[in-house]
Image (cartoon, rainbow, N blue to C red):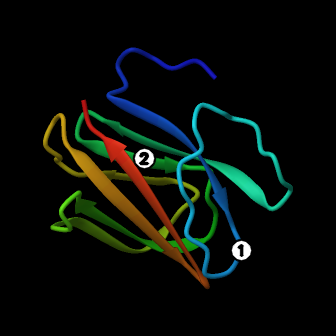
Amino acid sequence: MKIKNSFLLLFLFLASFKANSISTPFAESNISLYSNQEIVQLIYNNGEIKIEGLTGIGNVYIYSIIGNPEGSFYNESLESFKKPIQLKPKSMYIVQIETKGTIKTFKFVTK
């Protein structure tokens, strides 16, 4: 996968889809190690957050690193999730994605 210089943020995460699991970032890999895991990409570019690699309907919550809510999106299609949101540069955020029976949590830093 080629990363364009215009992207402010691109992280690859390995996310488990077991019920009630909470996933953590998987460093620098785009290969799934287990058949029940998929790659999730979280991209923040030009005031827009995009999530790739998930399917179904879910809720997406974005928090500052100290827990302040920055944005919420409810009953969204995760196959094509792309929403505008203004986040501060050089700041860390937490994204929580709820789907039926599953919660995924990711950290990312804006540039």
Q: Tell me which residue sits at (61%, 85%) in the image.
A: 101
Reading the image, the residue beneath label 2 is: 50
Q: Tag 2, which secondary structure?
A: strand
Nearer the observer, 78 or 18: 18
Answer with mark 1 or mark 2, whichever residue precedes in sequence: 1
- Apparent side of residue 88 relative to residue 11 in the rendered image (left or right): left
Above or below: residue 93 compared with residue 98: above
- Apparent side of residue 24 relative to residue 107 in the rendered image (left or right): right
Percent across and percent down for residue 98 are 49, 75
Above or below: residue 14 compared with residue 60: above
Reading the image, the residue beneath label 1 is: 18
Q: Tag 1, which secondary structure?
A: loop
Residue projecting furthest to the top: 5
To which quarter of the image does residue 63 belong? bottom left
Percent across and percent down for residue 48 are 30, 43
Report the amino acid beneath label 1: Lys
Q: How many marks?
A: 2
Report the amino acid beneath label 2: Lys
